Image (cartoon, rainbow, N blue to C red):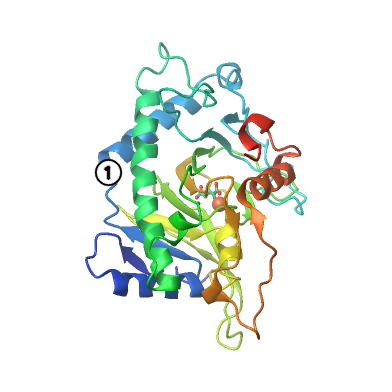
Amino acid sequence: MDEALLLPVIDLSSPDRLSTARLIRQACIEYGFFYLSNHGVNGDLLREVLSESRKFFSLPVGEKMKLARKEHRGYTALYDENLDPASSSKGDSKESYYIGPLEDPIAQIKLNQWPPQDILPTWRHTMESFYQELECAGKKLLSLVALSLILDEEDFFVRVGGMDKPTSFLRLLHYPGDVIASKKETYGASAHSDYGMLTLLATDGVPGLQAYFICRDKSKHPNIWEDVPHVEGAFIVNIGDMMERWTNCLFRSTLHRVMPAGQERYSVAFFLDPDQDCIVECIPSCYSESCPPRFPPIRSGDYLKERLRVTYGHDGLNSVVMKTT
Ligand SMILES: O=C(O)CCC(=O)C(=O)O
Ligand SMILES: [Fe+2]
């Protein structure tokens, strides 16, 4: 592996929105990855989230399994998931915990699962606060992404209904350090692209994340897996598949994976996904007669459901969540 690539750093607090949008456009075309600084998410809150995450994953397996993933919320155990169905790996050597959209006080359906308060009293509050702060940063970033694509329409994703009721998921991840490498390939997370619009990722600083950057000018660099190192105080942001569809592959949903670091690792990913009824359809500025849309329009909820079915063998979502209204 060559020395680590330095991805662009986008300052979310910059008052020069147009220049920021141009930088985002360049980063998304070239890499599909960038760092996000000055994002407004409290650093102490992130440390708290990582500490609460550690407490949860340290519980006995039996306790964790009481919260096993239902409706795509809750615990997924070690080797439960294989993000690259084409690989021969026995499953990814990670465990995780999903938290979906937060319930509003009058909602009848409560889908998120929470560890018992007598075991982890401040857990739910910490995760809900973090979810809200990430959603706020994600929405700000999304309006800059819209600006980077359409220039005069910062609320594009709001106008197409993507932000009516976003279906974002927060995912806590734990990669144990003592995984015994079998003869089969073992990955912390096997090669995959994310399904949604944008992913904001925070790590505890332990290395492992790699991305497969495809160089448009193949004479310059071969395609290669590159380390994506942790940058203190910044989120790693990557483009997801729905954004790739929206932009007709102008913005890249780059393959990435997590290699076992021989050391325990914690990370938190926030998948900013559109309202399930939003139709993901090529943005007019991203196609022309010579470059027609590559994908047919698709309902976001249907797309997500299919991707989860491939990853887990079933989507884990019932008709209540995914029904078309
Ligand atoms: O843990 C990481 O660094 C990456 C996790 C990831 O790519 C994912 O959960 O989609
Ligand atoms: Fe990912």
Quarter of the N terminus within the rendering: bottom right
Residue ranking furthest to the left: 15
Q: Residue at x 55, y 75 (%)?
A: 286
Residue ranking furthest to the front: 325
Q: Residue at x 39, y 67 (%)?
A: 153
Quarter occupied by residue 301: top right
Q: Position of residue 233 (x, y in %)?
A: 30, 52
Q: Position of residue 275 (x, y in %)?
A: 53, 46
Q: Position of residue 296 (x, y in %)?
A: 70, 64
Q: Amino acid at mark 1?
A: Gly
Quarter of the C terminus within the rendering: top right
Quarter occupied by residue 135: top left
Q: Position of residue 260 (x, y in %)?
A: 57, 48
Q: Kindly identify which residue carries mark 1.
A: 43
Seen in the picture, residue 316 relative to 64 is either above or below; the reply is below
Q: How many marks?
A: 1
Quarter occupied by residue 276: top right
Question: In front: 105, or 249?
Answer: 105
Q: Does the rendering let one see residue 188? A: yes
Q: Residue at x 38, y 52 (%)?
A: 139
Question: In front: 281, or 187?
Answer: 281
Seen in the picture, residue 220 relative to 98 is either above or below; the reply is below
Q: Residue at x 71, y 51 (%)?
A: 185
Seen in the picture, residue 180 relative to 202 is either above or below; the reply is above
* Left or right of 278 on screen, residue 133: left
Seen in the picture, residue 313 relative to 289 is either above or below; the reply is above
